[in-house]
Image (cartoon, helix red, strand yellow):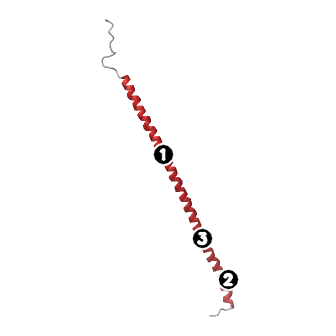
Amino acid sequence: MSLKLAELQIAIPKTFDAGKVADQIQQQSAINQSNAQAASERQLEKNRETVTKSNEATETSSQNEERERVEQERQKREKKEREITETKHPFKGNFVDFSG
């Protein structure tokens, strides 16, 4: 299979073009892999921060719930004490006897 001069003039430049395209495809694959790895690392870091923030929020909400519970208990106690002191005895203190 012999090639003529005219065929070589067309074949050789196309070989270089094909080599460039193959090189670009190989580089693009490497770039895509690098981008995918960077995106994965960003997502992983974001997940770590989310868990940390979630734990902090949980701790804060637990502390707030505890404070609210203590405050409600204190208010109930004060209300009971007020009711005890404010209740009137059915017959004590309603009539003053000066006759005797």
What residue type is disc 3 on? Ala
Say what secondary structure mark 2 lies in.
helix
Would you name the residue on which mark 2 appears? 13
Give the x, y percent position of residue 8. 67, 88
Quadrant that contains the N terminus: bottom right
Give the x, y percent position of residue 43. 54, 59
Which residue sits at x=40%, y=32%? 76
Instruction: Give whichever of 92, 2 is nearer the camera.
Output: 92
Would you name the residue on which mark 1 appears? 59
Q: Earlier in the sequence, mark 3 or mark 1?
A: 3
Figure quadrant of residue 70: top left
Figure quadrant of residue 5: bottom right
Q: Nearer the viewer, mark 2 or mark 1?
A: 1
Would you name the residue on which mark 3 appears? 30
Q: Earlier in the sequence, mark 2 or mark 1?
A: 2
- Left or right placement of residue 24 versus residue 44 in this view: right
Figure quadrant of residue 9: bottom right
Quadrant that contains the C terminus: top left
What residue type is disc 1 on? Glu
Give the x, y percent position of residue 72. 42, 35
Vertical relation: 54 (above or below) 88: below
